[in-house]
Amino acid sequence: MIINKLKLTNYRNYDNLDINLNEKLNIIIGKNAQGKTNILESIYVLALTKSYMSVNDKNLVKFGCNYSIIEGEVKYHDYLKKFKIKISDTGKHVLINDKDIKKMSDYISNLKVIIFSSENIHMLKEGPGVRRKFLNMEISQLSLKYVKILMDYNNIIKQKNEYLKLNNINMDYLSILNNKIAQLSVEIFLFRKDFIESINKILSDIFFEIMGIDGLKIKYISNIDFYDNKEIMIDKCIEKLNRYNEKESLYKISLIGPHRDDFIFVLNDKNVSLHCSQGQLRSIVLSLKLAEVQLFSNKTGESPILLLDDIFSELDSEKKNNLIRYIKDNVQIIITTTDINMIDEKLVKKASVFIINNGKIFPGK
Ligand SMILES: Nc1ncnc2c1ncn2[C@@H]1O[C@H](COP(=O)(O)OP(=O)(O)OP(=O)(O)O)[C@@H](O)[C@H]1O
Ligand SMILES: [Mg+2]
């Protein structure tokens, strides 16, 4: 899919922005703090209704304004769709082809984007919550069913946590909640396992092409136990949840379930976040994103839009060339950089170039 047009009103440091994008490569150049990342972020928000950064929606609205609008026109194989999202004090409204969409779950997963930014590197260093958010955002783009299951799961875990805060806990009531939690937990587990296994089929090859190192994998860590049979898995999960009833009542919080999941990257069985260099970590996350582009294309038949925020800094020229070879012609890419000289001349020739200066955009060539 291709985003042809992007329009911003009162978004971050933009009063108004109106651009037509190239269906292959777009390069956004600008000095620091001019608004390059903000453009990529706005496309992400248009797709997923929230930022990939841990910020409140009101931070997306331009200082001093009370609403913000992002609009985009997206081309699929044989049709166009217009997306619009309005963020204000009263909440968020989303529209497709000018029609109000009531449920966010009907909106998300129409427009698919993969973003690589320095924020993603934190994914390797921070707590598991960041990695779970990543899994949820990505799988949500691939499956509407996952969005719904996750919403149900979050609601019931919230309900259970509120109940655990009370003084007189009825174990039978907890067991009733656990039955429902087990079913949803297993569904979520299987979605995540499938996503990670699919990524693993391509990740190692991509990392090898860029870095020349073999053996990169993601390892899924969950307190749900896997069995080949789904019914058995659910039964075992119920047993486990019930075994924790006492402990959970004591700690007043639910301890078992995919809301405690995590994953790590391993390079030849070693956890990368413990021993890899900064440049290597960057390339690991970048390889993950490129693997996702392939996975999304395979699963949905449409390639996602690839947003690359400042990818070329911190990569030496050999790795940069390896990466450029990897960038496929059939994916729309939007790259930001502070220095056009960081990007191969041949690529620049093919691209639309934009210059950003203090929230204003100018044609770059
Ligand atoms: N809600 C907001 N209202 C107005 N300005 C904002 C808002 N949020 C962020 N900004 C401004 O946007 C600018 C940062 O934009 P952005 O992160 O896109 O910069 P950048 O061009 O990517 O810079 P760098 O090269 O350093 O990554 C800052 O000047 C910041 O003050
Ligand atoms: Mg930036």
Image (cartoon, rainbow, N blue to C red):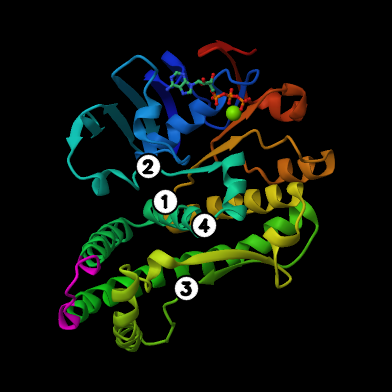
Range of the magenta residues?
163-173
Which marked residue is nearer to the observer: mark 3 or mark 1? 3
Residue 166, magenta (yes or no): yes
Q: Are marks 1 and 2 in contact (CB under 8 Å)?
A: yes
Q: Secondary structure at mark 3?
A: loop
Q: Position of residue 65 (x, y in %)?
A: 32, 15
Residue 318, magenta (yes or no): no
Classify mark 4: residues with Cα within 10 Å, few (<14), some (14-19) or many (20+).
many
Which marked residue is nearer to the observer: mark 2 or mark 4? 2
**Mark positioned earlier in the residue sequence (2 or 4):** 2
**Mark positioned earlier in the residue sequence (4 or 3):** 3
Which marked residue is nearer to the observer: mark 4 or mark 1? 1
> Residue 48, which numbered label?
2
Name the residue beneath numbered marker 3: 222
Name the residue beneath numbered marker 1: 137
Which marked residue is nearer to the observer: mark 4 or mark 3? 3
Q: Secondary structure at mark 2?
A: helix
**Quarter location, residue 119:** top right
Name the residue beneath numbered marker 4: 295
Q: Position of residue 194 (x, y in %)?
A: 46, 69
Which residue is drawn at the image coordinates 65% and 18% (left, top)?
Answer: 31
**Mark positioned earlier in the residue sequence (1 or 2):** 2
User: What is the C-alpha distance between the residues marked 2 and 3?
Assistant: 25 Å
Q: Position of residue 113 (x, y in %)?
A: 46, 42
Q: Are marks 4 and 1 in contact (CB under 8 Å)?
A: no
> Residue 264, which numbered label?
none
Task: Identify whether 153 is placed above or below 322.
Answer: below
Which residue is drawn at the image coordinates 78% and 53% (left, top)?
Answer: 211
User: What is the C-alpha distance between the residues marked 4 and 1?
Assistant: 15 Å
